[in-house]
Image (cartoon, rainbow, N blue to C red):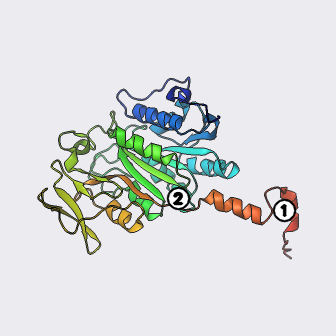
Amino acid sequence: MTKNTTLTKSDFVSDVTAKWCPWCWDFIILSQLQNTFAKAWIPKEDFVVISGIGCAWRLPYYIDTYWFHTIHGRAPTIATGVKLSNPKLQTWIMTWDWDWLSIGANHLFHVMRKNIWVKILLFNNQIYALTKWQLSPTTERWRITKTTPIWSIDEHVDPVKFALGLECNFVARTIDTEMTLTQEILDRAVKINWTVFVEILQSCVAFNPWSLNPIRNREIKEDYILRVEHWKPLIFGRNKNKWIIIENFKPKVIEFDIDKIPENIVIYDETSKELAYIIGNMSWEEFPIPIWIFKSLEWLSYEELYAEILEKNNIKNRGISEILEDWEIWEIK
């Protein structure tokens, strides 16, 4: 693609008809991703979309670019190979809460700690929906499912806490109904050259439609959501009169008169690892659910360091036989 070539969303629409449950928000996310690709000024052939298992695995079929449908939890290993063989490729991974936080948790762990230059979209509907309503690692405690017919007593996994704990350099959370926010995060992510992790909170229309009700209700959602914006104060509530402050490294909610700004306000900084960890670890029972970009901290990607090592050791243009014969060989007797 040359500078004068303009792509549109339709250029990324494949000839495969998108099929999910009626009213599923995956249709919207697919459309937003196609918009992001079209606006990125990147050739179509430089995109690769990789998926594992779950409802999100269908998404690569519907995008007209290169794609790979892998097995349970193994998308990160394929993506790592793609990036090391051709670092210029925009590699996006579509995954589901149980696909990566249960079966594939080990692979998610390593792709983040290595800082592989991939974009991870984790669709979190808090249930095994594709296999009809079993307990997921992100299902909240005290829920009834087919695999927990009495009650679930498991503590659920928070994907954002997981990513922040692994020092992932770009961590964000959005909600399927927050379309403007989701589009903004995707547009930001396409420009970043290190690991990107985006959790998309969803309600499964078939098997978990009642989840996330407070944060999807237009009338009351602002009391349950904290929009974490760079260089802006941590204010929430329908009347914008609730504030998150930090005392002794712990968050606290205070209410104030909108005409009188508190002295100990917190201005959010997405380059602060410490602040991201404090806000990202807030309990949903006690605090509003934080969304937006928690952390964006530039760092050398694994591929950049890998290429540097190859160049320094003159390995890039050498054959495997030459490399092996050149190295010291240990003889075991």
Query: Residue, x 45% and y 32% (percent of image)?
Result: 31
Instruction: Judge whether 331 appears above or below 174 on screen.
Output: below
In this rendering, position of residue 228 left or right of residue 310: left
Figure quadrant of residue 318:
bottom right
Query: Residue, x 47% and y 40% (percent of image)?
Result: 54
Secondary structure beneath disc 1?
A: helix
| Residue 223 rendering spot, x and y as whole percentages | 19, 50
Query: Residue, x 52% and y 26% (percent of image)?
Result: 10
Q: Which amino acid is tagged 2?
A: Met
| Residue 35 rendering spot, x and y as whole percentages | 47, 34
In this rendering, position of residue 21 left or right of residue 42: left
In this rendering, position of residue 153 left or right of residue 75: left
Of the 4 image quadrants, the one containing the C terminus is bottom right
The residue singled out by tag 2 in the image is 112
In this rendering, position of residue 130 left or right of residue 287: right
Instruction: Judge whether 331 appears above or below 149 on screen.
Output: below
Of residues 34 and 161, the one nearer the viewer is 34
Of the 4 image quadrants, the one containing the N terminus is top right
Q: Which amino acid is tagged 1?
A: Ile
Query: Residue, x 57% and y 38% (percent of image)?
Result: 41
Image disc number at residue 26? none
The residue singled out by tag 1 in the image is 323
Q: Is residue 69 visible?
A: no
Q: Residues within 10 Å of mark 2 (few under 14, many from 20)?
A: many
| Residue 99 rendering spot, x and y as whole percentages | 48, 47
Instruction: Judge whether 169 appears above or below 35 on screen.
Output: below
Of residues 187 and 202, the one nearer the viewer is 187
Q: Is residue 252 visible?
A: yes
Q: Residues within 10 Å of mark 1 (few under 14, many from 20)?
A: few
